[in-house]
Image (spheres, rainbow, N blue to C red):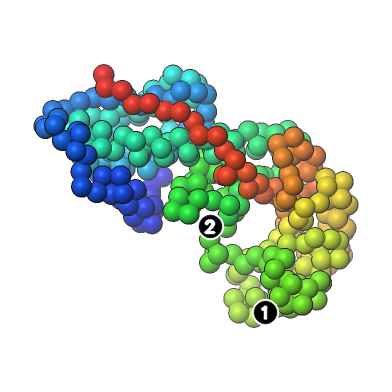
């Protein structure tokens, strides 16, 4: 179990308020009746969302019990009980749908992330998959958590956490290798050596320029596996000449079907579909 951040707690409060700002008018008829409820999963998946959902139930005074071996990151089968909740029935039912929605979305992302990471590890044990910033506004923090629960890297959490020179930045700086050199130089001047700089490269010349300018990560964007391999090899050769280490990332046009073709050439493969393409997992809550 991990501790939720203040930002995550704030969002959870907003989610619950948005669903029942003036109370659950149906469940209010239950008065002080207490109940015991179980949440079960309707399909095999990697569980994610245990921590935020536990927090929601505890916020309304309910107690939460997790079966042994169940937690975020656990792989479970269909029909498995992942949580038991006890307390005032009216309060538990008020939280029910918000909690199930969180579990459904997060577990879908974690499950797809685990599948992608497993494919990559079979092709290249040192390569990792990562998410992107293609996330849902207002739910990004939890989608990033879900990526990690599935074994993927979250990539940068937001625009303030890491510098990333993309095609439009480079174009605004004059384009091509020279635009990349200007961008990296200015970022180093502004933020120093402790700021990680990633550069998006669309061809070998841009990749070499990013390396020579001092980029920490070079993203090879929208290249075929064969082209990606050739460009990555050139960058690595040049890095050895400069006695520099650099992380190489691939992104754009990558699918589950060709994922393993990219893995041997790079350190990281970033995949937007891990968040926007994940299928939600079904959960249900029943009184026992």
Q: Where is residue 149 drawn, in percent x and y?
A: 52, 40
Q: Kindly identify the residue that appears in the image at 80 percent across and 60 percent down.
A: 202
Specify whether 106 is left or right of 54: right
**Residue 167 appears in view:** yes
Dot 1, crowdedness within 10 Å: few (<14), some or many (≥20)?
few
**Residue 186's disc number:** 1
Whether 211 is drawn above or below 189: the answer is above
Tell me whether the residue at label 1 lies in contact with that at label 2, contact meaning CB atoms closer than 8 angstroms.
no
**Residue 62 appears in view:** no
SS under mark 1: helix
**147 or 239: which is nearer to us?**
147
The residue where tag 2 is placed is 157
Q: Where is residue 258 drawn, in percent x and y?
A: 77, 38
Give the image quarter of residue 213: bottom right
Q: Where is residue 229 drawn, in percent x and y?
A: 85, 49
Specify whether 127 is left or right of 148: right
């Amino acid at each position: 179990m991990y501790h939720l951040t203040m930002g995550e707690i704030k969002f959870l409060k907003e989610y619950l308020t948005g669903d029942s700002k003036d109370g659950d008018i149906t469940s209010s008829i239950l008065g002080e009746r207490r109940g015991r409820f179980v949440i079960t999963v309707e399909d095999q998946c990697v569980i994610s969302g245990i921590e935020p959902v536990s927090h929601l139930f505890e916020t309304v005074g309910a107690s939460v019990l997790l079966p042994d071996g169940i937690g975020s990151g656990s792989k479970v089968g269909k029909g498995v009980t992942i949580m038991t909740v006890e307390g005032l029935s009216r309060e538990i039912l008020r939280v029910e749908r918000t909690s199930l929605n969180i579990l459904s979305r997060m577990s879908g992302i974690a499950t797809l992330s685990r599948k992608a990471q497993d494919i990559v590890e079979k092709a290249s044990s040192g390569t990792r998959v990562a998410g992107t910033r293609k996330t849902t506004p207002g739910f990004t923090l939890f989608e990033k958590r879900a990526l990690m629960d599935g074994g993927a890297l979250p990539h940068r959490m937001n625009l303030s956490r890491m510098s990333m020179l993309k095609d439009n930045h480079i174009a605004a700086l004059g384009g091509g290798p020279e635009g990349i050199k200007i961008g990296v130089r200015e970022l180093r001047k502004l933020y120093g050596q402790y700021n990680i700089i990633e550069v998006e490269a669309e061809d070998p010349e841009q990749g070499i320029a990013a390396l020579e300018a001092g980029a920490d990560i070079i993203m090879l964007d929208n290249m075929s596996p064969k082209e990606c391999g050739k460009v990555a090899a050139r960058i690595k050769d040049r890095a050895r000449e400069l006695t520099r280490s650099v992380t190489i990332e691939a992104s754009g046009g990558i699918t589950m079907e060709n994922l393993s073709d990219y893995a041997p050439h790079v350190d990281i493969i970033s995949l937007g579909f891990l968040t926007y393409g994940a299928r939600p997992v079904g959960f249900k809550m029943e009184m026992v």
